[in-house]
């Protein structure tokens, strides 16, 4: 069977690239083997500010300008909602923390997002002696719902195979590639941390940063904003809250651990005082890169193999922009931003 593209992996990266192909009427098939879980477990939060350092997220404005309409289009396509907008309330730890906030609200790239007024209102069940700072233009994409619906949609269209892609089975012909029963012009690898098993691209410096989350049920907590402290507490409705996330640089598995749970519970109890029950725990590996920029572009020796990876901790904001850039590079020969191009590692 002839297809224009094979996509390997259907997380946020694969999904964003597939949407480019759909819009351009290209034919394709996706391989997905459920080996990675990052896009399924992600908090899904988009936030234009790095609150730990009070700096803007890299290209935040430009990324949001592409990402928000992208998710809106998918909401129309599936006749549902994925994007929930909310305020992020940063919990201040000290007077110094408040002062840093005031300073940040004056910075040109941050003033649009950070509210200079401190919110001193007491809220039942939340420890915040120094008040809160409000971040605007933030929200959350329900990535699990989106990825699951997208896989269903591809299944109905006969465009996805729930199988492991075996890299050693690619046959390189003069003008095309063959993979089992498929003849294709290009293969785009969107494998997340699975890239480490990709014999063509595993020379790239992808680091694993495992993250764990818990979902709690807290009947006495009633908030419709995200609390940001040393972790986030994200309202899901019906008194359910997603709490996360941990950062672990040595564990390469996607399994929830006791250690992860203990860390989250200890941090959570410094933020909320009401009783709660843990109802779920999940984990995944964030595909991060040394220089914190995505990995995009064509293989230096095999020009029919391309990669879309390295979305790190911000897949929601980054994926739509970099998928578009890769598509325009492959189809229209437009140059990739040097910051994201894998040529930087040659
Ligand atoms: C705990 C946690 C919390 C997070 N919170 C946020 C957040 O709040 N906001 C945010 O923007 N980002 C967040 N992230 C990061 C975000 O999840 C990632 O940036 C993003 O999901 C990466 O998407 P991806 O498609 O590149 O990788 P993945 O989601 O890992 O997808 C890769 C896919 O490829 C498949 N695959 C791999 N190898 C093969 C193969 N050989 N054959 C077939 N299929 C294969 C895998 O099964 C997987 O489905 C979080 C991550 C974690 C772990």
Image (tube, helix red, strand yellow):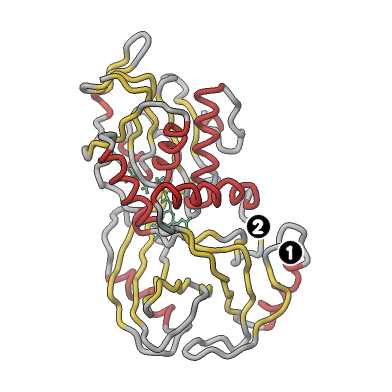
Q: Which mark is residue 164?
A: none
Name which residue lies at 45% across and 85% down.
272
Q: Which mark is residue 56?
A: 2
Left or right, residue 268 beside residue 59: left
Whole-Å distance between the Cαs marked 2 and 1?
A: 10 Å
Which is nearer the eye, 23 or 31? 23
| Pointer 1 local density, CA inside 10 Å: few below 14, some 14–19, many at least 20 | some
Quadrant in which the N terminus is drawn: top left
Report x, y in % for residue 42: 40, 59
- Quarter assignment of residue 210: bottom left
Left or right, residue 35 beside residue 24: left
Q: Say if residue 250 shows up in the picture.
A: no
Task: Establish if 152 lies above or below 41.
Answer: above
Counting residues from the start of the chain, the first of labels 2 and 1 encountered is 2
User: What residue is disc 1 on?
Assistant: 111
Task: Establish if 67 lies above or below 272.
Answer: above
Q: Label 1's element?
A: loop
Q: Say if residue 268 shows up in the picture.
A: yes
């Amino acid at each position: 069977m002839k297809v224009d593209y094979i996509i390997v992996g259907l997380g946020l990266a694969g999904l964003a690239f597939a949407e480019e192909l759909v819009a351009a009427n290209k034919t394709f098939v996706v391989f997905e083997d459920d080996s990675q879980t990052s896009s399924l477990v992600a908090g899904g939060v988009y936030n234009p500010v790095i609150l730990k350092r009070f700096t803007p997220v890299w290209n935040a404005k430009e990324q949001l300008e592409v990402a928000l309409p992208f998710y809106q289009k998918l909401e129309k396509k599936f006749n549902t909602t994925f994007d929930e907008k909310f305020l992020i309330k940063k919990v201040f730890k000290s007077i110094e923390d408040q002062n840093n906030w005031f300073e940040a609200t004056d910075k040109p790239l941050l003033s649009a997002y950070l509210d200079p007024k401190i919110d001193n209102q007491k809220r039942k069940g939340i420890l915040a002696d120094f008040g809160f700072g409000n971040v605007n233009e933030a929200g959350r994409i329900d990535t699990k719902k989106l990825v699951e619906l997208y896989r269903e949609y591809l299944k109905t269209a006969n465009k996805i195979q729930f199988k492991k892609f075996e890299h050693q089975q690619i046959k390189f012909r003069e003008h095309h590639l063959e993979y089992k029963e498929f003849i294709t012009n290009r293969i785009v690898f969107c494998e997340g941390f699975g890239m480490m098993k990709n014999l063509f691209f595993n020379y790239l410096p992808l680091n694993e940063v495992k993250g764990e989350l818990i979902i709690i049920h807290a009947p006495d907590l009633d908030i419709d904003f995200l609390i940001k402290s040393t972790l986030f507490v994200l309202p899901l409705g019906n008194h359910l809250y997603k709490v996360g996330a941990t950062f672990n640089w040595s564990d390469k598995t996607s399994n929830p651990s006791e250690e992860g749970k203990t860390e989250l519970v200890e941090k959570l109890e410094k933020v909320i005082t009401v009783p709660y029950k843990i109802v779920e725990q999940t984990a995944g590996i964030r595909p991060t890169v040394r220089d914190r920029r995505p990995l995009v572009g064509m293989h230096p020796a095999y020009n029919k193999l391309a990669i879309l990876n390295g979305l790190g901790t911000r897949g929601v904001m980054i994926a739509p922009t970099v998928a578009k850039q890769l598509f325009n590079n492959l189809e229209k020969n437009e140059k990739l931003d040097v910051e994201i191009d894998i040529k930087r590692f040659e």
